[in-house]
Image (cartoon, rainbow, N blue to C red):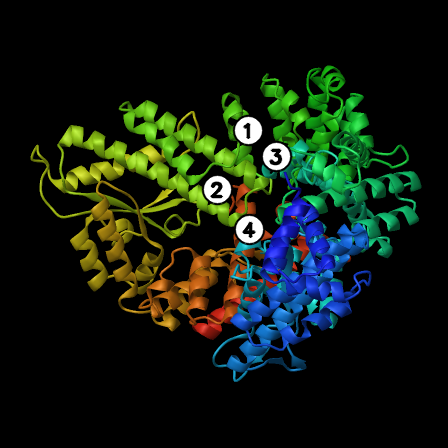
Amino acid sequence: MPSPGQRAREAYREASPDADPEALELAAALGAHAPALLPLTIADPSILDDIRRRPLDRHRDAADLRRLFAPVAALEDGPELHRALRRTRHRAMVRIALREILGLADIDRTAGELAALASAALDAALTACRRTLERRYGEARAADGPVPLTALGMGKLGGGELNFGSDVDLIFFYGTDDAEVGDGLETSVHELFTRLVRRATRALAEVTEDGFVFRVDLRLRPEGSRGPLANSLASAERYYESFGRDWERAALLRGRPIAGDPAFGAEVVEALRPFVFRRQVEPRLAEQMHELVRRSRRELAADPEQNVKLGRGGIREAEFFVQSLQLIWGGRHRELQVPGTIEGLRALRHLGLVSHADAAALEEAWALLRRVEHRIHMVAGYQTHDLPGDREELARSLGYADAARFEAALAEARAKVAALFDSLVERPDEEEDPLAPLLEATLAGQPADELVELVEGTLAVDDGVEGATHLARLARRASSPFGPLGHRERPALARLLLAEVHRAADPTLALRHMADFFLRNQHGFDAVLAEEPRLTRRLVGLFGASPGLAELLVGHPESLGRVFVGASVPSAAEIAEGHASLAELEDAERFVSELRRLKREHGLRIGLAHVGDELGDRATQRLLTALADAQVEAAFRFALSESERKLGATETPMAVVGMGKLGGGELGFTSDLDLIFVYDGDGETDRGRALVELFSRTAQRALRLLSQLDAEGPGYEIDTRLRPSGSQGLLVVSRAAFERYHAERAQAWERQALVRARVVASSAAAFAERVGAELAETAYARGAPDAARVAELRGRMQRELAGERGHRYHPKLGYGGLVDVEFVAQCLQMRHGGDASVRRRHTLDALDALAEGGYLAPGDAEALADGYRFFRSVEQTAALLDPSGSGALTFGGPRAASVARALRVRRRDEDPPARVLERSWRRRAEEVRAIFERLLHPVGVPAPWQETTP
């Protein structure tokens, strides 16, 4: 049977009958070692003819490759550009592969040349596409000149370590939104750069008859796949300041300007440097990197041990070993602030942070792992990291005599990497553990009054008395993790728990619920926590962030297994399916208990994921709304069935309409449910009872089922005052009466409230659809309410309901808060409601649709969305910490400090996190209010801080 090389030689000879022997040998080499690239040369034999005429031993640097793509950059966006990009890339890619196959380039040189190729191709695409767009719309110019754009290469591209099958990870930034495009009438700066990024990345990634250039991944950008394709530098800084996560720091560590304006690229890197590299040493990052590896191993690799990237001792562990130490120490040692893995490793060795022996071992193992990865990609032609079933061919291509020797060498390399990676979470004796004094004193059984000072100093709380009391309680229970027996059985658990208390939003609250958890419940759950640090983080995080959810968890240990151990985030479908079984119940008491149990368990699963940073605000709102929908649907159907058994049945349909946050899909953990009950016409049941009596009883019963107290947990707070005539009106209303009321008597704000209305339950699908259509028609048919009246209402809400004064602010009702954003969105929706695309219930969706339709400037939409996300995060966090609170937050008090901790706000210069949060609040509120008054009407109520400066 002919070898792969022989088959390749014959295939190439058929494509190019006049091929000379040297070209045939090059084709054979590709067939044997990079078969995925061979079809490129068969489709275009001139590739090998061109390569053999030029010296292969000459390395091409970034400048060479930019010159290669210069003619491509001169083209206009379109099919010709796409074709030229692909053909130029194919020639360069084949040449790079042959240089490695023939031993003319080592792995580092190959990876660097591939990264330079991707950079040159992207730069050409950006240049061509920007020229095309600016001819159409005009140049993007600010006061100081053209607005710059840069692309940061991330991951392997940023580190100059690209493989043959790698995607390219990119983030795009532009200079400013304070600029105009052309005459400023057709498009904004943000829209122009969004179009540019979309076109340029499509030029690279779209598969045409000529193939593709590189697959592109933009998910590392701010807000991930939901975020804008391009961000101004200012908006990116705001995002990372308020919402940036540690994994984003690790990602940006490898960020490098690879295309666009190089000077602006350097400015972006410098601006983001304080976010990535902190002055304080952060050993906890090593544990977080360990968790990232474990998570990716679980989620991305079907068989991790066969995966040279995600498996034990694989490329990811080698990368994260270096990156962890760079992030921990990089704020103090600028020489560590480099994107490449080996570059970073050598800097660590030079500083003495990694020994010469360990650095040499890791560099050797890294070289082998990367060579294996390269070969796998060259054979497959796409990004995979799984070792092939037949290792013989791979072993020979890497210079090993047989598969056994290759596997032995690979196993040795992976063992070295794994040992080094594991060493990150071992604390050297000379490194002082900041938790050690408090931990040792607690384990020694010191009384509470001797722990107070240690609690205050270690956990940074003003009053350590309560926390010390709870730690002393735990130490007195022999079997607890802090007692002598429990600590002897699981010596690492006490420190792990204390570390998570230190991270918690409110450490005292976390200690209170942690003590109750271990002392009240004899469930042996500590064994699970000792094995799963991620679960410990979620549990203690919940204890310190939400008294309500914590008390539910502690008070119902029987549900721990279902809620906590291995529990994933529930999907909306899973929530609905869980409630389906309630339809079989007829006993009201049992129904309520089951309804509360489902609310508690699903709510706890959502809460654990949210507090543990595994579920963002938007996803949390969506799932809490899905849970409320399922609860309302179940309660309504039970109430209707029970009422019909008592009063008689009817075919006349009834519906439950959700308003406010429920209608908009924006529910929070402590939100009440705004409900309206509508039925279709008058008449009687089959027992001669008036329909209004049947439906009134149904509504009253449904409300009781949803809200009454039960041992299984609390129900919902219900508000029905948005019905016609408010609390003075009938609880249920016919469809005709509802329409008459809104046609003749309703105030403008009542029509505005219908923008977010939707049917959440109904006895007939057709009726639900009809009511939904009529709600939209009522909301949008008469256009927007008078802007001055809206502003007057907004001012009254701020004056009379927000309770703002001095340093006390309200995230929803206060100056520039959530209501400002909602009112702007809803008024613009009603003004332009003839365009069905803007009829969105969720505020963020509405802002996106208004901007997409050209009814709201993208810069305004972005600022309003940023304000909405910020104030919803604050509102939700504050509500979790104090469910019975007014919603207002007083800066200078303990709750504001807890909210800042929960939101992971960082100290800036001499300002503590709460002060930083307050400044962020003011800046966003002023920006939101300015947009409100510019687009609608002046409110005339000042900010509470006008006469108070922090």
Look at the numbered discs 2 and 3 and tell me whether their residues touch, using CB distance below 8 Å. Answer: no
Q: Earlier in the sequence, mark 4 or mark 3?
A: 3
**Residue at left 8%, top 34%?**
686
Toward which corner of the image does residue 831 lie, by quadrant?
bottom left
Residue 811 appears anywhere in the view? yes
Tag 4: residue type?
Answer: Ser
Question: Left or right: 818 with respect to 124?
Answer: left
Report the Cα–Cα distance between label 3 and label 1: 18 Å
**Residue at left 32%, top 57%?**
754
Look at the numbered discs 3 and 1 and tell me whether their residues touch, using CB distance below 8 Å. Answer: no
The residue that mark 4 highlights is 873
Q: Is residue 713 above or below residue 165?
A: above
Toward which corner of the image does residue 436 lie, by quadrant?
top right
The residue lying furthest to the front in this view is 18
* Element at label 2: loop
The residue lying furthest to the bottom in this view is 183
Residue 167 appears anywhere in the view? no
Question: Left or right: 715 with respect to 335?
Answer: left
Q: Earlier in the sequence, mark 1 or mark 4?
A: 1
Q: Earlier in the sequence, mark 3 or mark 1?
A: 3
